[in-house]
Each structure stands twice: as structure tokens, then as C-alpha cells.
């Protein structure tokens, strides 16, 4: 299976990640260094439940992740294969794709 990300999908996934700035929530920060099984745009992986990781990039000091939502899409970039739902967590390293049945030799986007 192949797991990749694209700018349009990255923007979509960013909507699911909320960042705290004082007492208000904003989604102004960008995500960078998106990885699956610790690799960027892997051509193939053998993990049945791959792990996702990302970094937050924001010029403003003090912002931090308070929640995330990962959506896994089929090769057509419109068919949802799996979603984590909104998870209240600051974790952004090694987040498991639990519950999705992924097929071998298949391209996925997140």
C-alpha cells in the first residue's frame, strides 16, 4: 500500500487540528514534515495499522496542538476509508491508524 499526502489533503486535515492561542481556538498554524511509518511519502509499507506523525509550524510563540483528526482517503481523494474522529490530544508522533482495513498495492492519501 502507498500512503501519501498532498497540499489539498494537508489543508483538509489541518481543519481537524485545533491549536490553542490564549482562550480562543485557531487553525492558523501549518503542518509540516508529514510522515507515515516515519517516512515521507512512502512508496510501500507493510504495516497493517500505519503510524502517522506531523509537526506544527507557526511563527507565533506559545501555540500548541490540543486535538487532531486524521482522515484517510482512497486514491480518488474523495472516498473516505477511515477517520480517527476528533481526538483531544497533543500527540503528533506515531498516531496509529486503528480500525481501517487497508489493502496491499493500494494508494491512500491523508
Image (spheres, rainbow, N blue to C red):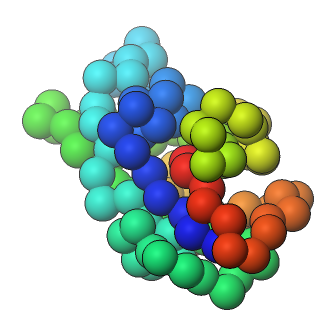
Residue 94, x across and y down, in percent: 56, 70
Can residue 35 be seen here? The reply is yes
In front here: 30 or 65?
30
Residue drawn at 34 percent across, 38 percent down: 7
In front here: 31 or 77?
77
Can residue 88 be seen here? The reply is no
Q: Is residue 45 left or right of residue 97?
A: left
Q: Quadrant of residue 60?
A: top left
Residue 13, x across and y down, in percent: 51, 35
Q: Is residue 76 left or right of residue 103?
A: left
Residue drawn at 47 percent across, 76 percent down: 43
Q: How many marks?
A: 0
**21 shown above or below 4:** above
Residue drawn at 79 percent across, 65 percent down: 102
Single out the residue that lies furthest toward the bottom.
46
**3 shown above or below 19:** below
Single out the residue that lies furthest toward the left.
59
Q: Quadrant of residue 49?
A: bottom right
Amino acid at each position: 500500500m502507498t500512503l501519501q499526502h498532498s497540499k489539498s489533503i494537508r489543508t483538509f486535515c489541518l481543519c481537524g487540528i485545533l491549536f490553542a492561542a490564549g482562550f480562543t481556538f485557531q487553525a492558523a498554524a501549518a503542518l509540516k514534515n508529514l510522515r507515515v511509518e516515519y517516512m515521507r511519502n512512502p512508496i510501500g509499507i507493510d504495516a497493517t495499522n500505519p503510524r502517522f506523525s506531523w509537526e506544527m509550524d507557526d511563527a507565533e510563540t506559545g501555540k500548541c496542538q490540543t486535538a487532531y483528526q486524521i482522515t484517510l482517503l482512497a486514491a480518488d481523494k474523495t472516498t473516505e476509508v477511515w477517520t480517527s474522529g476528533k481526538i483531544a490530544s497533543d500527540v503528533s508522533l506515531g498516531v496509529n491508524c486503528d480500525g481501517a482495513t487497508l489493502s496491499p498495492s493500494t494508494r491512500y492519501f491523508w
